[in-house]
Image (cartoon, rainbow, N blue to C red):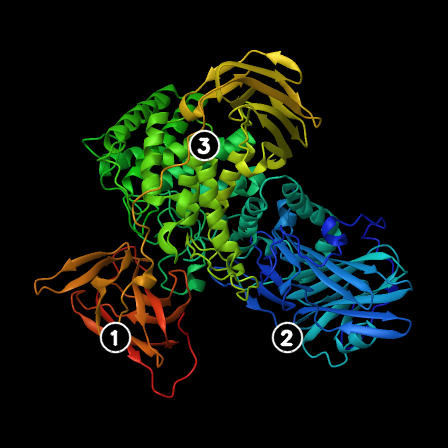
């Protein structure tokens, strides 16, 4: 190898690492129409592509630029533009040269022709001088080899088609600014430096690979060091016969070693060049992996919106994942820079266990080894006692650091313990890996005992095993006690099963008693008009019932109770008529929770139409504004009144940890569920109204591999079904479970043979159980179910007379230049209001990540450039972030709150803010280094900008 300044052009060579056999063009690659396909997710700033815990890059097809987040996760470091990074094209035909200095997607009706669907990003660059150019970029997705999946690289395969009648030459270059780093040419590959390497290869016939600056490339299709400076590229030049198609591959590799904890890949590779070598070696396999997931999922007739929405939640594998050298695995919460976040992550872990069980088990081991000595499962696995600096907070705690501080005191948090039990059970059930489970079984038992201890400490005497003073995920308001009680019922049920399986009869009896008691107490306390109090987060009150149904545990409470709860929730939320509600968006409810807790209840009780209205509204709020596709916060997004078809936002720090919980709804619809321990198989597909009675080749993933479920329904209520289950690899089955929507008569045939049927379960968990023992091979299992119709599905709900949530735009405006009492905030999360002996009302109980919202603050045309608050600081290192329009938004200023000598003195402090004009909702976000109350807040105001000031944030 040679320094680039000494040699720029790499000699001609055959590329033996690339198979010399062409593969056919996909439909996306071969299409030539003018329209962007309806299913395409175009106009984003690119799908984030990178290895697990290794950072990511994204290519903005609209502008032809790159952004990178080299040190994960995005909520701590986020994406930044890469200087001078992009692709360039050179063509030559009959001596005539045509070039494109920055390749951008062709435009169709004002939007780019691309499709960002993780782990793929496909781009149509159109034709230049008769050479059509398309690209398939992808992340290193690998279900069988976690090592290959955990490296810092992204992949770009170009398809070049000579559409002309004469021979031509074409060359592609991938360039970026490597700064002052030493750069070397690597013969036959491209360039390398410690931090960045770009290696390339071409299909089949000889190709010229060169490395250096772009001046020579635009003249001859060869990279050279002419005028290169810090901008360096790798170029591939190929001949094209008339009508010929060639493929060119690039591997973009990076190496970021500033992380003191050391990412896993830093223990495997010395610099970016060895990562790029690995990328070239595994390019074909990784491309096939990524394309298989996307193409097979899209091949079904499930609605495009559902497939896109569900698939793209997997971007968290690139943006939110962390994987350290010593094996610690965790996900970042997103939005708030908490890591781990058990209360949110257990919702999303189901798909991890099915798709990537290695990482699911590794993450659970980390949770187990950081479990508190009293059995409590933590909320966080990062350093939360270091203040507001996201970089300082992005340090994961060590193995076995059991007593570290969380973002707040979590002693009362029941759902953390229940979530750990649920995750351990689900991963064990999906994989059947007894050794992995038994390694954490002592921790599971301790988490369960901790719930019983919390019952004693914070439970109700009147309604045993429910709670009066517990806390949980709902830290922003609402009553946490019903969710904890219903979720604990699931935990007790699982513990009864697991203890029985482990041969611990006394333990099983203890949790059976706990289960029976909490079920009865919950019913007496909450399942009546007086007890079921509607309000913020009441969607979660029946979360245990939803979870039991989706986990195929049977119903906890009978169908009459289920219907009562849904009638109450419908009166409050009205999803069939209002979707998510809250036209201007809100943090009062959380998208992944309401769509799973409530939407899942609807799906599992034959109310698919109501579920679709709810979840499709969530999809439209996200996808009609392309800025949110890979940057969706926890809160409900606002209705999109004017679509934003082309995104400009490159950041992904808001991308939330629990969004992959939507896979739970997807699996309920596909109907696949399997217990790898007992070999029980559930096939209970839900054919949505828009699918016209048929589901074709709906994809599922399991630790055994992929497979598909197809079904044709008939009969008055669609109860009769012809099912085809086709796994990619042989699957052993001992019991088959099917939906029971029948009257007195029912018949089941399996592969043409009529078999006896047992009717099990009750209410919405009624099932047909068939004792079919055998192995299902790749030809599939054919099941026919028919009989007299049972009860009709519930009719659409009545429209409520309850008024819709108030849009903040209808409220009176607030003058920010006059002091405003903090206690007058229109909305709050986690805080309280107190009144002192002088009659002063103030906000108290302010903890980490609590917030206040002041709606319709009118800054006028002149605007404000400072913020002032009267505060009583309780601990050092506390502060207030000033944010506009969205609690997950970006701060325009930050106020440091001094700690008072005795914590009882009021003081007035000010800070500059980025100039803001017009009308905004203003959020005050609180942060600090303590689990305890950070401060009290009396009043706030803004200072007017000088008359000559310019720039800054403008009104809506």
Task: Answer whether residue 233 is visible to the viewer in this image.
Answer: yes
Label 2: which secondary element = loop
Tell me the crowding category of disc 1: few under 14, some 14 to 19, or many 20 or more residues within 10 angstroms, Cα based.
Answer: some
Q: Identify the image quadrant of residue 58.
A: bottom right
**Sequence-earlier tag: 1 or 2:** 2
Label 3: which secondary element = loop
Q: Quadrant of the N terminus?
A: bottom right
Q: Nearer the viewer, residue 681 or 646?
A: 646
Gap in angstroms between the C-alphas marked 1 and 2: 42 Å
Q: Which residue is mark 2?
A: 179
**Sequence-earlier tag: 3 or 1:** 3
Gap in angstroms between the C-alphas marked 2 and 3: 56 Å
Label 1: which secondary element = strand
Residue 909 image label: 1
Looking at the image, do the residues carrying marks 3 and 1 touch, with CB atoms under 8 Å apart? no
Q: Nearer the viewer, residue 403 or 425?
A: 425
Residue 767: image x %, image y %?
A: 48, 21
Residue 408: image x %, image y %?
A: 31, 53
Mark nearest the camera among 1 and 2 is 1
Furthest residue toward bottom: 948
Furthest residue toward left: 837
Q: Which residue is mark 3?
A: 604
Tell me the crowding category of disc 2: few under 14, some 14 to 19, or many 20 or more residues within 10 angstroms, Cα based.
Answer: few
């Amino acid at each position: 190898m040679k320094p680039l300044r000494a040699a720029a052009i790499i000699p001609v060579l055959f590329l033996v690492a690339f198979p010399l056999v062409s593969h056919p063009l996909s439909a996306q690659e071969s299409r030539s129409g003018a329209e962007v396909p309806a299913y395409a997710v175009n106009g984003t700033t690119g799908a984030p592509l990178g290895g697990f815990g290794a950072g990511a890059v994204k290519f903005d097809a609209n502008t032809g630029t790159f952004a990178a987040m080299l040190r994960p996760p995005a909520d701590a470091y986020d994406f930044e533009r890469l200087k001078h990074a992009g692709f360039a094209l050179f063509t030559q035909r009959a001596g005539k040269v045509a070039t494109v200095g920055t390749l951008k997607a062709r435009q169709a009706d004002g939007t780019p022709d691309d499709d960002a669907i993780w782990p793929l990003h496909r781009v149509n660059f159109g034709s230049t001088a008769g050479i059509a150019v398309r690209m398939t970029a992808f992340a290193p997705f690998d279900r069988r080899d976690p090592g290959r999946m955990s490296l810092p690289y992204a992949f770009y395969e170009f398809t070049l088609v000579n559409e002309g009648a004469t021979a031509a030459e074409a060359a592609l270059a991938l360039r970026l600014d490597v700064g002052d780093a030493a750069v070397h040419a690597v013969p036959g590959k491209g360039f390398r430096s410690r931090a960045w390497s770009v290696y390339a290869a071409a299909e089949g016939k000889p190709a010229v690979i060169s490395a250096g600056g772009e001046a020579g490339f635009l003249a001859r299709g060869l990279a050279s060091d002419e005028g290169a400076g810090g901008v360096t590229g790798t170029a591939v030049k190929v001949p094209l016969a008339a009508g010929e198609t060639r493929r060119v591959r690039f591997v973009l590799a990076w190496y970021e070693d500033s992380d003191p904890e050391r990412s896993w890949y830093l223990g495997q590779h010395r610099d970016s060049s060895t990562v790029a070598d690995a990328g070239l070696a595994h390019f074909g396999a990784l491309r096939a992996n990524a394309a298989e997931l996307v193409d097979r999922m899209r091949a079904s007739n499930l609605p495009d919106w559902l497939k896109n929405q569900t698939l793209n939640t997997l971007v968290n594998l690139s943006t939110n994942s962390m994987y350290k050298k010593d094996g610690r695995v965790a996900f970042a919460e997103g939005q708030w820079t908490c890591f781990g976040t058990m209360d949110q992550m257990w919702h999303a872990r189901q798909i991890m266990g099915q798709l990537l069980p290695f990482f699911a088990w590794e993450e659970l081991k980390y949770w187990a080894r950081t479990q508190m000595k009293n059995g409590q499962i933590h909320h966080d696995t990062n350093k939360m006692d270091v203040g507001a600096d996201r970089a300082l907070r992005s340090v994961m705690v060590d193995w076995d650091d059991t007593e570290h501080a969380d973002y707040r005191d979590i002693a009362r948090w029941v759902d953390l313990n229940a979530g750990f039990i649920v995750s351990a059970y689900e991963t064990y059930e999906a994989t059947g890996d007894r050794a992995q489970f038994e390694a954490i079984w002592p921790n599971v038992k301790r988490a369960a005992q901790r719930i019983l201890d919390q019952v004693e400490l914070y439970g109700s005497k009147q309604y045993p095993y429910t709670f009066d003073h517990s806390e949980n995920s709902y830290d922003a308001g609402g009553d946490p006690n019903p969710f904890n009680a219903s979720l604990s019922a699931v935990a007790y049920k699982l513990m009864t099963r697991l203890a029985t399986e482990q041969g611990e009869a006394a333990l099983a009896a203890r949790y059976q008693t706990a289960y029976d008691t909490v079920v009865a107490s919950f019913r007496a306390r909450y399942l009546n008009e007086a007890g079921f109090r509607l309000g913020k987060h009441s969607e979660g009150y029946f979360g245990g019932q939803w979870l039991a149904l989706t986990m195929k545990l049977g119903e906890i409470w009978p169908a009459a109770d289920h219907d009562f709860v849904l009638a109450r929730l419908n009166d409050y939320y009205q999803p069939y008529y209002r979707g998510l509600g809250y036209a201007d968006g809100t943090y009062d409810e959380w998208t992944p929770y309401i769509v799973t807790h409530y939407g899942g209840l609807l799906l599992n009780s034959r109310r698919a139409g109501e579920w679709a209205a709810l979840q499709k509204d969530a999809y439209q709020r996200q996808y009609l504004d392309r800025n949110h596709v890979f940057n969706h916060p926890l809160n409900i997004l606002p209705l999109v009144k004017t679509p934003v078809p082309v995104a400009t936002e490159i950041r992904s720090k808001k991308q939330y940890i629990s969004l992959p919980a939507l896979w739970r709804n997807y699996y309920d619809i596909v109907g696949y569920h399997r217990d790898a321990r007992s070999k029980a198989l559930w096939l209970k597909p839900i054919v949505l109204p828009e699918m016209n009675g048929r589901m074709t080749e709906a994809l599922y993933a399991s630790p055994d591999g992929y497979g598909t479920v197809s079904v044709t329904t008939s009969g008055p209520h669609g109860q009769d079904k012809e099912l085809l289950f086709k796994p990619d690899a042989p699957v052993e089955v001992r019991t088959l479970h099917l939906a029971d929507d029948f009257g007195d008569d029912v018949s089941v045939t399996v592969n043409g043979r009529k078999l006896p049927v047992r009717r099990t379960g009750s209410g919405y968990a009624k099932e047909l159980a068939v004792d079919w023992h055998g192995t299902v091979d790749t030809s599939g299992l054919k099941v026919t179910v028919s009989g007299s119709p049972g009860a009709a599905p519930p009719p659409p709900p009545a429209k409520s007379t309850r008024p819709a949530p108030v849009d903040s735009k209808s409220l009176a405006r607030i003058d920010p230049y006059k002091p405003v009492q903090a206690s007058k905030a229109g909305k709050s999360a986690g805080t309280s209001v107190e009144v002192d002996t002088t009659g002063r009302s103030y906000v108290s109980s302010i903890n980490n990540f609590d917030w206040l919202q002041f709606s319709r603050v009118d800054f006028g045309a002149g605007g404000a450039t400072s913020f002032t608050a009267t505060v009583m600081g309780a601990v050092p290192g506390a502060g207030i972030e000033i944010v506009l329009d969205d609690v997950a938004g970006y701060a325009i200023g930050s106020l440091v709150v001094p700690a008072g000598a005795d914590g009882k003195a009021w003081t007035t402090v000010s800070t500059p803010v980025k100039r803001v004009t017009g009308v905004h909702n203003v959020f005050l976000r609180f942060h600090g280094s303590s689990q305890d109350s950070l401060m009290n807040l009396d009043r706030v105001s803004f200072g007017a900008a000088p008359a000559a000031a310019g720039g800054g944030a403008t009104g809506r």
